[in-house]
Image (cartoon, grey):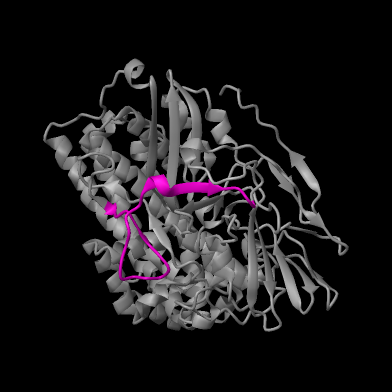
């Protein structure tokens, strides 16, 4: 879908269009983009641009309230995962597993090898599916001009596709001129009939679209094909998870999919689906990212359009954190070697990385719609709503009270500092820490694209990091599925570690810190007499989309917009492109407002309800 359901007014020209609100404020323009679409959840961005159309200030606001933590109080901790996964409709299995792992940490349980591998495969399947869907169906239209594709030469398009596949080092997924001609004919037909549907209200023709007609046709063709591929990808998670979304096979102590592990046909099916998925990733997704990255290289290296003068447009904080994830051995949850290393890289300094200390994590609510007057560690966190509304002005629009509280998202900070999390953070941390696998994949991308490593510190770099990670993840999963088959064939069919609940659940606490597709995800639980007494989840988009904290420090979204040059304030393509590069996931709304501050609906959740 496109940004076609918000409101725009440019006061100088008295021009109204259905996309954003732009009001003149003393020589500067105040742009409201609400809601940002093609994301999970409801997100509002307000930006101030100067006379040169450069963003000089920005504010990120979630207009959704999440109350899952309150619902989990008083529950049996073994049941928390099934409810915690409802935090999100996209990363369901990730919240599920993190919640289970928090309880396992509290109970000091080490799961069997088969359970570790199966969990890795379930999560890995989510990664490759999620990243593919994000690039094509949520983000690609920020780079691809759909109507331009109608002017392409199909034969030249086939040559162009082969060229970029060669750059990526793989065979093109679509190579025939006839295939591209068929897609083009469909788009032309829909355009003539005024039936472009989801492509109908884009900012087509905006001068910050950089691809040629042939390159745009490649993007549109792969967009449509990805609709079929992602359906097959989803089946992988269901093989061991039971279903997709909301898998059911992970339990405290291990997994329940015993028959799937015992059946060679099920493992073989997973591997076949993975192979078919990776054929598209390597023959279409990666080449498309090389193509777009090269076309937008000028923006990706424009130091004048950055928050801190390093990288390019959308670079932002330049501080990155990864909790680490995907255990590769059975030495314990926080002792095992992991596919993604844990660590911090601060202020764009790629000469060193720091270890992550969970004790240094705290959430600030100075500018968040919650009660509280000091940062709290998640073990002691509170979720007490305190909504103070928007500021209605004479122009008829409602604006964020940016000097006060202006978002339902809290402001997580590490040792008092804001950090970015996500695929870019994982690749940067792994590269700086010298992880051989990550250095190989990142190095290949930089060598084949001919771009410097600093290009990663940009909107384009953030998008490229997700593609690099997808290739890496798919290759690693091939190793894991063979490892599972070999282990099962050896006679090891253990899937669960027995524990005495009455003993371990007396008075304890635990945390599940790992990675979700969008970044570092933590679940913290306190347990007494077998019941949850406190529960907090700090999700990736909480880190990235956070409002300013008590020190006035911006979150990652806000910082990434500073310096961005907007070609046309009435078409905030550049704002949307950078925000989409984070793949926002802002879920579980109970309070909805329109752009004029009118309350549309209020939903009350009974924290003591039963499911």
Where residue 449 appears, as percent x and y from the top left, is 35, 79
- Taking depth in this image into account, of 106 and 460 the one nearest to the observer is 106
The image shows residue 276, relative to residue 496, as above or below, that is below
Left or right relative to 92: residue 30: right
- Taking depth in this image into account, of 289 and 403 the one nearest to the observer is 403
The image shows residue 378, relative to residue 13, as above or below, that is above
Where is residue 161, by image quadrant? bottom left
- Highlighted magenta segment, given as a residue range: 339-367
Where is residue 283, by image quadrant? bottom left
Q: Residue furthest left?
A: 490
Where is residue 565, by image quadrant? bottom right
Where residue 495 appears, as percent x and y from the top left, is 25, 30
Q: Residue at x 42, y 19 (%)?
A: 530
Q: Assign the C terminus to one quadrant of the image.
A: top right
The number of callouts visible is 0
Q: Is residue 244 visible?
A: no
Left or right relative to 152: residue 100: left
Q: Residue furthest right?
A: 394
Q: Residue at x 43, y 47 (%)?
A: 521
- Taking depth in this image into account, of 304 and 404 the one nearest to the observer is 404
Q: Assign the N terminus to one quadrant of the image.
A: bottom right
Where residue 585 appears, as percent x and y from the top left, is 54, 51
Where residue 124 appears, as percent x and y from the top left, is 34, 49
Left or right relative to 96: residue 437: left
Q: Residue at x 30, y 48 (%)?
A: 326
């Amino acid at each position: 879908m496109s940004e076609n359901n918000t409101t725009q007014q440019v006061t100088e020209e008295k021009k109204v269009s259905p996309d954003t609100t732009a009001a003149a404020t003393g020589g500067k323009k105040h742009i409201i983009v609400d809601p940002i679409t093609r994301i999970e959840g409801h997100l509002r961005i307000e930006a101030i641009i100067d006379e040169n159309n450069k963003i000089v200030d920005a504010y990120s606001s979630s207009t959704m309230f999440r109350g899952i933590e309150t619902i989990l109080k008083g529950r049996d901790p073994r049941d928390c995962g099934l409810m915690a996964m409802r935090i999100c409709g996209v990363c369901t299995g990730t919240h599920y597993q993190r919640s289970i792992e928090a309880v396992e940490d509290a109970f000091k349980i080490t799961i069997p090898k088969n359970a570790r591998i199966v969990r890795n495969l379930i999560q890995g399947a989510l990664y490759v599916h999620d990243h593919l869907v994000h690039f094509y169906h949520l983000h690609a239209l920020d780079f691809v001009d759909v109507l331009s594709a109608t002017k392409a030469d199909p034969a030249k398009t086939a040559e162009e596709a082969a060229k970029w596949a060669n750059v990526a080092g793989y065979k093109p997924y679509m190579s025939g001129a006839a295939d591209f001609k068929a897609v083009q004919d469909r788009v032309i037909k829909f355009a003539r009939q005024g039936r472009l549907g989801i492509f109908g209200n884009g900012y087509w023709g905006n001068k910050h679209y950089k691809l040629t007609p042939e390159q745009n046709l490649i993007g549109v063709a792969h967009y449509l094909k990805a609709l079929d591929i992602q359906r097959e990808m989803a089946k992988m998670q269901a093989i061991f998870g039971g279903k997709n979304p909301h898998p059911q096979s992970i339990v405290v102590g291990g997994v329940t999919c015993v028959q799937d592990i015992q059946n060679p046909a099920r493992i073989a099916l997973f591997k076949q689906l993975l192979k078919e998925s990776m054929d598209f990733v390597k023959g279409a997704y990666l080449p498309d990212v090389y193509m777009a990255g090269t076309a937008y290289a000028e923006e990706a290296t424009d130091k004048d359009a950055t928050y801190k003068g390093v990288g390019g447009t959308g670079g932002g904080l330049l501080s990155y954190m990864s909790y680490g994830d995907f255990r590769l051995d059975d030495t314990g949850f926080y002792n095992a070697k992991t596919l993604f290393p844990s660590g911090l890289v601060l202020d764009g300094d790629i000469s060193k990385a720091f270890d992550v200390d969970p004790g240094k994590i705290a959430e600030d609510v100075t500018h968040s719609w919650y009660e509280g007057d000091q940062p709290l560690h998640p073990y002691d966190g509170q979720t007490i709503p305190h909504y103070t509304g928007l500021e209605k002005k004479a122009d008829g629009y409602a604006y964020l009270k940016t000097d006060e509280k202006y978002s339902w998202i809290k402001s997580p900070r590490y040792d008092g500092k804001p950090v970015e999390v996500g695929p870019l953070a994982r690749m940067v941390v792994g590269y700086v820490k010298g992880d051989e696998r990550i250095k190989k994949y990142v190095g290949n991308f930089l060598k084949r694209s001919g771009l410097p490593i600093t290009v990663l510190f940009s909107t384009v770099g953030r998008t490229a990091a997700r593609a690099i990670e997808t290739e890496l993840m798919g290759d690693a999963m091939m190793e894991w599925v063979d490892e599972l088959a070999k282990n099962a064939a050896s006679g090891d069919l253990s899937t669960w570690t027995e524990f005495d609940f009455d003993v371990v659940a007396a008075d304890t606490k635990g945390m599940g810190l790992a990675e979700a597709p969008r970044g570092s995800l933590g679940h913290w639980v306190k347990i007494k007499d077998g019941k949850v007494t406190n529960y907090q989840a700090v999700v990736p988009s909480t880190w990235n989309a956070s409002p300013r904290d008590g020190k006035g420090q911006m979150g990652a979204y806000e910082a990434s917009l500073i310096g961005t040059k907007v070609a046309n304030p009435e078409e905030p393509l550049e704002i949307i492109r950078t925000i989409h590069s984070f793949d926002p996931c802002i879920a579980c709304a109970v309070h909805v407002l329109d752009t004029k501050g009118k309350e549309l609906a209020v939903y009350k959740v009974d924290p003591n309800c039963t499911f």
